[in-house]
Image: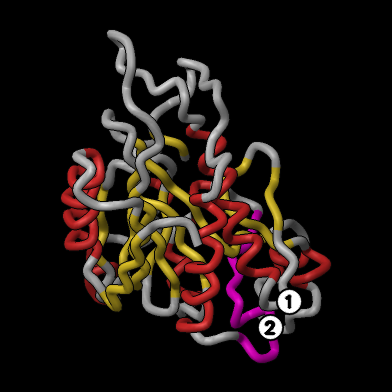
C-alpha cells in the first residue's frame, strides 16, 4: 500500500478517541507523522454532528443511562448515528491540502470528493466478502439495495422496501487541511441500538450489518485487514480533484 500508518486500538471510549484524533491531526499538519488510519470500536455511544437535531434521539436521558449509552455532540458533519461494539470505526487522519489565500480555503482538496472516495473504499472492502453495496446520489454513506436485503430473513421490513445503510460517514477537514472523523461500518453490532435514533436523520431507510446479510459473516479482524488493504487505494493518486469550489463546506455530512 501507499505510505501510511495503521493503528489498531481495540475498544476505546468515544471522547478518548476524539482527543486522540485532535492530537494526531496537529502532528500530521506539522509533518511529524504520515497519513494515518485509526481502526477501533466504541462502547455504546450516540453522536450528533454539526447538522444534528436533538429530536432524532428517541430515547430520554434516563433511558440512555439505563442502557449504558453515552451521548456526544461532536464537530463532524451530519446528524445522529450510533457507535458500539461489533461496529468497525475508521478515522483517517490525512493531509488533504494546505490552506491558501486570505479566506483559508484549500482549493486543491475536494471535500465532497474525499467523502465519495471513502465510500468507494468501503464498497471495495464489502465486495471482497461477496456483498454488493453502492452509493446513492444526494445521500452520504454506503447502501445495500432491497433485492439484497430481501434474502435476509431477520432484516427490518424497511430494508426490503428501500436501500439500507451499512456504513455511515461523517467527516471534518480542519483549517490546516487535515481530515478527522470518518466511517462506521456495521460488521456485527447489536442492531437494536439503532432503534433509539433516526439514523443520520433519514427516515424511510433501514440499517443493516454484514452479520444480517451474510450466512457466514467475516470476523472483525478480517474486515480490518481488508480495510487496511483498501486504505492503500485511498492514498493512491488521484486522491482528490484539482478544483474545489469555495462553496464546499469544510465539514461534510
Query: Can residue 54 be seen?
Result: no
Q: Would you identify the image quadrant in which residue 9 lies?
A: bottom left
Q: Is residue 130 left or right of residue 65?
A: right
Query: Can residue 80 be seen?
Result: yes
Mark number, residue 205: none
Residue shown at 16%/50% (left/top)? 23
Q: Position of residue 79 (x, y in %)?
A: 42, 45
Q: Which residue position is annotated with label 2? A: 214
Q: Check disc 2 and report its element: helix, strand or loop.
A: loop
Magenta span: predominant SS is: loop
In the image, residue 113 sits, relative to residue 18, either above or below, namely above
Q: Residues within 10 Å of mark 1 (few under 14, many from 20)?
A: few
In the image, residue 212 sits, relative to residue 55, either above or below, namely below
Residue shown at 44%/42% (left/top)? 78
User: Which of 54 and 9 lies nearest the eye of the viewer?
Assistant: 9
Residue shown at 63%/80% (left/top)? 212
Is there a contact, CB below 8 Å, between mark 2 and mark 1? Answer: yes
Circle 2 or circle 1, nearest the eye = 1
Q: Is residue 145 left or right of residue 91?
A: right
**Is 224 inside the magenta-drawn segment?**
no
Q: Which residue position is annotated with label 1? A: 130
Q: Position of residue 245 (x, y in %)?
A: 52, 17
Q: Residues within 10 Å of mark 2 (few under 14, many from 20)?
A: some
Q: Which residues are magenta?
A: 205-217
Q: Is residue 196 left or right of residue 123?
A: left
Q: Position of residue 127 (x, y in %)?
A: 70, 69
User: Which of 227 and 47 lies nearest the eye of the viewer?
Assistant: 227
Spatial separation of the CA atoms under disc 2 and disc 1:
8 Å
Amino acid at each position: 500500500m501507499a505510505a501510511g500508518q495503521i493503528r489498531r486500538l481495540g475498544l476505546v471510549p468515544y471522547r478518548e478517541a476524539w482527543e486522540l484524533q485532535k492530537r494526531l491531526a496537529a502532528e500530521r499538519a506539522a509533518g511529524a507523522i504520515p497519513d494515518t488510519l485509526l481502526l477501533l470500536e466504541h462502547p455504546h455511544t450516540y453522536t450528533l454532528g454539526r447538522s444534528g437535531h436533538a429530536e432524532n434521539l428517541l430515547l430520554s436521558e434516563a433511558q440512555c443511562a439505563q442502557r449504558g449509552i453515552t451521548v456526544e455532540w461532536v464537530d463532524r458533519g451530519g446528524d445522529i448515528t450510533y457507535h458500539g461494539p461489533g461496529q468497525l470505526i475508521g478515522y483517517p487522519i490525512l493531509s488533504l491540502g494546505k490552506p491558501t489565500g486570505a479566506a483559508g480555503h484549500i482549493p486543491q482538496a475536494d471535500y465532497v470528493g474525499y467523502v465519495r472516495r471513502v465510500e468507494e473504499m468501503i464498497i471495495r472492502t464489502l465486495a471482497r466478502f461477496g456483498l454488493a453495496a453502492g452509493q446513492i446520489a444526494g445521500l452520504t454513506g454506503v447502501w445495500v439495495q432491497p433485492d439484497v436485503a430481501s434474502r435476509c430473513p431477520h432484516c427490518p421490513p424497511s430494508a426490503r422496501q428501500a436501500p439500507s445503510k451499512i456504513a455511515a460517514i461523517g467527516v471534518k477537514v480542519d483549517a490546516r487541511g487535515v481530515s478527522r472523523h470518518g466511517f462506521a461500518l456495521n460488521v456485527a453490532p447489536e442492531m437494536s441500538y439503532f432503534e433509539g435514533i433516526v439514523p443520520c436523520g433519514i427516515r424511510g431507510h433501514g440499517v443493516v450489518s454484514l452479520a444480517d446479510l451474510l450466512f457466514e459473516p467475516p470476523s472483525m479482524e478480517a474486515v480490518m485487514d481488508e480495510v487496511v488493504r483498501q486504505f492503500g487505494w485511498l492514498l493512491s493518486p488521484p486522491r482528490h480533484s484539482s478544483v474545489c469550489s469555495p462553496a464546499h463546506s469544510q465539514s461534510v455530512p
